[in-house]
């Protein structure tokens, strides 16, 4: 397994182009199963997660071609079983259930395992499918859904931890071919849900209200091929802005949608970083006297859970006492023990991390655990004295396109050590 060595103390400057959104690409690639015609998707980042999705589509019978960031999928004939050995690698593969149900009126997908950020239930997805008239069975670790005829329904997707992003996507994709008008209440409002709805509408679907908690879908008889460019990755953008706050003498992220990153830029400005938005670029300057913060993760447009670990790394050396409360995945604190190995002063009180800023961090061998926690450890290494060795960086490669190379372009002294 590869490692990343981060030599702390270097200042970052310059600009970086942000890649297409991972969390937009995955459901949009799944949605190509809804038509026999070719679909062309631009801006798909080269990540292990997106490549797993392409493997799944190919396994399901689709013809898949990738030319750098452009993926062409032609699902002329599909069969409806996604096998465990691929699904287990990526939980988000559950989002092929909706399009398979819409297209084939049946689907079987291995039940996704949990992961280090917590149990990842899909009860709300299944509740939505049942409301659309599907019979749902869990058999031998597979979820099997079957609906001779899908019917429109009124569905509430709100769960105890708020709306479900992929659940909203899945039900939307199953409903687009269901006769009648389906209403999803308590829908997720994330930009990635809007991007999927825009792609489905280009395919001939009739979806209104995406981006609000009430999505209305008028079923159509069939969908046709479409061409689309996925939105920029707001979490990658936020991650690089935090890198600029930690060690930057002027870092600019380009090709972003500033509105999608507003919850992050507002907090960075609030604790004292100079943030400047100009068109599709955002610049940030480090600030040695930036202050503590109180952060609560919330569904969009609130502060995103996917930026929580990165902010913990930043706040570990901001003067004062910060608190970070994780409302979406209350166990999402695998990074805390590793940050403490670097000298951070963090204590967990239930789903809240209380961070007393320290003067500096010390480089140490640390272990990556999930995608965003891994990025947080690299960020902490940028400002630590000495070398931070981050192991199991395959977690990073799942969701960041060449993170180490992009940080090097900004001036970081960072090297990837290939495993023997
Ligand atoms: C998406 O996951 C993202 N992944 C996650 O990003 C992100 O953290 C999450 O949304 C929240 O914003 C992709 O889009 C591929 P949820 P998703 O269903 O859709 C509970 C990353 O780092 N829940 O919105 O799987 C769930 O346990 C990844 O890029 C139920 O209870 O998350 C959680 O507490 C990590 N029942 C909350 O809802 C369900 O049926 C939100 O989960 C579904 C979810």
Image (tube, helix red, strand yellow):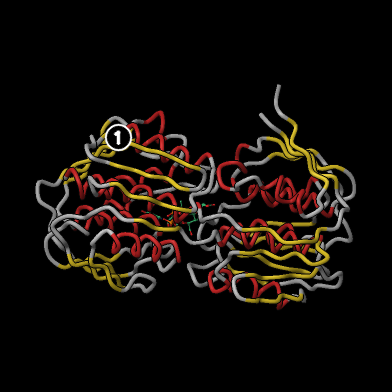
Which quadrant, please, contains the N terminus? top right
Q: Is residue 369 visible?
A: yes
Mark 1, residue position = 60
- Horizontal placement of 221 versus 166: left or right? left
Asked whether 244 or 322 is in front, the reply is: 244
- Horizontal placement of 232 versus 254: left or right? left
Residue 389 on image: x %, y %: 78, 38
Ligand 1: image quarter: bottom left
Q: Is residue 124 visible?
A: no
Q: Is residue 133 above or below residue 414?
A: below
Residue 66 on image: x %, y %: 45, 40
Q: Residue at x 37, y 50 (%)?
A: 40
- Quadrant in the picture for residue 173: bottom left
Q: Is residue 413 above or below residue 190?
A: above
Q: Residue at x 85, y 42 (%)?
A: 387
Residue 276 on image: x %, y %: 70, 76
């Amino acid at each position: 397994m590869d490692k990343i060595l981060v030599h702390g103390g270097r200042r970052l400057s310059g600009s970086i182009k942000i890649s297409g959104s991972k969390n937009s690409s995955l459901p949009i690639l799944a949605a190509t199963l809804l038509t026999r015609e070719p679909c062309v998707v631009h801006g798909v980042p080269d990540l292990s997660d997106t490549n797993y999705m392409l493997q799944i589509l190919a396994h399901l019978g689709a013809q898949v071609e990738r030319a750098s960031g452009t993926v062409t999928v032609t699902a002329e004939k599909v069969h409806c079983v996604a096998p465990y050995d691929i699904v287990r690698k990526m939980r988000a593969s559950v989002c092929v259930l909706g399009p398979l149900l819409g297209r084939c009126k049946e689907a079987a997908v291995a039940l996704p395992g949990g992961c280090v950020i917590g149990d990842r239930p899909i009860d709300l997805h299944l509740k939505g499918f049942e409301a659309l008239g599907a019979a749902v069975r869990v058999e031998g670790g597979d979820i099997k859904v079957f609906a001779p005829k899908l019917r429109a329904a009124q569905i509430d997707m709100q769960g105890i931890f708020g709306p479900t992003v992929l659940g909203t996507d899945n039900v939307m994709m199953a409903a687009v071919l269901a006769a009648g008008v389906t209403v999803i209440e308590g829908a997720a409002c994330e930009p990635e849900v809007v991007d999927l709805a825009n792609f489905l509408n280009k395919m001939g679907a009739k979806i209104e209200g995406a981006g609000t908690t009430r999505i209305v879908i008028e079923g159509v008889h069939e969908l046709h091929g479409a061409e689309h460019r996925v939105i920029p990755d707001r979490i990658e953008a936020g991650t690089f802005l935090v890198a600029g706050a930690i060690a930057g003498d002027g870092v600019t992220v380009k090709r972003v949608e500033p509105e999608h990153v507003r919850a992050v830029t507002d907090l960075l400005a609030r604790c004292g970083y100079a943030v400047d938005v100009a068109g599709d670029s955002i610049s940030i300057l480090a600030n040695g006297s930036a202050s503590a913060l109180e952060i609560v993760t919330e569904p969009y447009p609130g502060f995103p859970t996917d930026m929580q670990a990165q902010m913990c790394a930043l706040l570990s050396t901001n003067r004062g006492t910060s608190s970070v409360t994780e409302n979406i995945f209350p166990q999402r604190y695998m990074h805390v023990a590793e940050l403490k190995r670097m000298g951070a002063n963090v204590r967990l009180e239930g789903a809240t991390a209380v961070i007393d800023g320290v003067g500096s961090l010390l480089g140490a061998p640390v272990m990556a655990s999930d995608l965003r926690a891994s990025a947080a450890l690299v960020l902490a290494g940028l400002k630590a004295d000495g070398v931070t060795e981050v192991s199991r960086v395959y977690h990073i490669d799942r969701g960041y396109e060449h993170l180490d190379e992009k940080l090097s372009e900004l001036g970081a002294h960072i090297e990837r050590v290939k495993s023997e």
